[in-house]
Amino acid sequence: MTKKIITGILLLLILSAVLYLALQGPQETTSLSNAFYQKAKELGYTGTHLQFRSDIHLPEYFIVALAAMLFCRAMGQKPYIGAAGACLFGLLEETIKIFLPTREFGPRDLLMDLTGAALALFLFLTVTAIRRNKHPKG
């Protein structure tokens, strides 16, 4: 029961943070992305600020999908459901931006969301398979 509660709270916190970022006004979102962009450049990122704003969706949705898959596992569901939920949430986030006057739907952002979720699913399944092979049921 504890795993269900902890993973559920973690997932809700992460989804809330993503929605908070999606609903920010132009000044807030630009200020935040500028700060992260400068740190990324210090670490060797070479893309433009606009590219960075899309690229950051990949690790963002990697985290969303991992949290969703952990929650699904705690609930006895397949990890695919969590990854699919993360993809749907990414689509919802981008669709919401259509209706916000200061934001816009980003096809590249959505592609990064889906890629992040797919990478999380791949990692999750790989780690699960490795753990299963190290500790076979018997």
Image: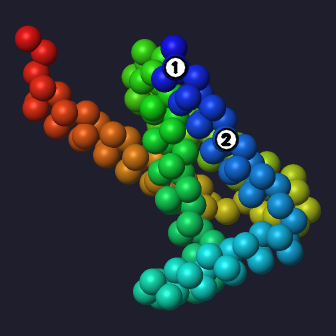
In the image, what residue occupies the spot 50% across and 59% down? 59
Q: Could you say where residue 132 lies in the image, as x and y percent from the top left?
A: 17, 28
Q: Are marks 2 and 1 in contact (CB under 8 Å)?
A: no
- Which mark is nearer the camera, 2 or 1? 1
Please give the label number shown on residue 120.
none
Gap in Å between the C-alphas at discs 2 and 1? 16 Å
**Residue 1 vs residue 81, the one in the foreground:** 1
Q: Is residue 125 above or below residue 76?
A: below
- The residue to which callout 2 is attached is 13
In the image, what residue occupies the spot 56% across and 66% down? 56
Three-letter amino acid code of the residue under disc 2: Leu
Task: Judge from the rendering whether residue 68 lies leftward or rightward of residue 129; answer left or right.
Answer: right
In the image, what residue occupies the spot 41% across and 29% down? 79
- As helix, strand or loop, the secondary structure at mark 2 comes to helix
**Residue 20 vs residue 97, the one in the foreground:** 20
Q: Could you say where residue 38 lies in the image, as x and y percent from the top left?
A: 60, 85
Q: Could you say where residue 94 lies in the image, as x and y percent from the top left?
A: 70, 52
- The residue to which callout 1 is attached is 2
Mark toward the start of the polypeptide (2 vs 1): 1
Quarter of the picture holding the C terminus:
top left
